[in-house]
Amino acid sequence: MDERQADTDRRRLLALIGSGVTVGLAGCGGGGGGGGGGGGEEATATATATATATATSSGDGGDTVPAEYETATSLGGTQRSPDSLSSKSAVNYQEQPNDGQQCSNCQFYIEDKNGDGMGACAIVAGNIDPSGYCVSYAEYQG
């Protein structure tokens, strides 16, 4: 059980790092404001946090969640923070389950609150299909 959790944590970390690198490289193409430079571990941590937040802002083409989900709490007790979400593409989100693993039994899933059949996620931007799956999946133990 501990090894499975370690694998899940490792996959989530890699997904978050990947989203930071992707957004960081996309920013090199121009069009974004801000400057700054610097180096070292502190600058890298700040750049990764900023890149993750930026990925949410650019969004998934208008796939925004209703207000009741913006800071809702997931099944596992994680509160959603709109400023620090990963994009669906960064976590390889898909609308089908993967070997029985699906969003509706993930600790980060926020259940349907408005009757439309869709939920949200504490760590991924946009509306989330309860039968969906992403690499940040972590089984809910409750």
Image (cartoon, helix red, strand yellow):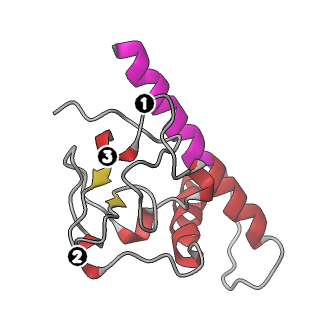
Q: Is residue 30 above or below residue 138?
A: below
Q: Quadrant of residue 124?
A: bottom left
Which label sits in the foreground, 2 or 1?
1
Q: Quadrant of residue 8?
A: top left
Left or right: 30 as drawn, with respect to 99: right
Give the magenta range.
2-17
Q: Is residue 137 above or below residue 44?
A: above
Look at the numbered disc 3 and give the secondary structure of its residue: helix
* Residue 116 falls inside the magenta stretch: no
Q: Quadrant of residue 37?
A: bottom right
- Dot 3 or dot 2: first in sequence order is 2
Please name the predominant secondary structure of the magenta segment in the image.
helix
* Residue 16 falls inside the magenta stretch: yes
Label of residue 104 in the image: 3
Mark 3 vs mark 2, CA separation in Å: 18 Å
Mark 1 vs mark 3, CA separation in Å: 11 Å
Which residue is the site of mark 2?
68
Look at the numbered disc 1 and give the secondary structure of its residue: loop
State the quadrant of the C terminus: top left
**Which of 118/137 is in front?**
118
Q: Visible in this render: residue 39? A: yes
Which residue is the site of mark 1?
100
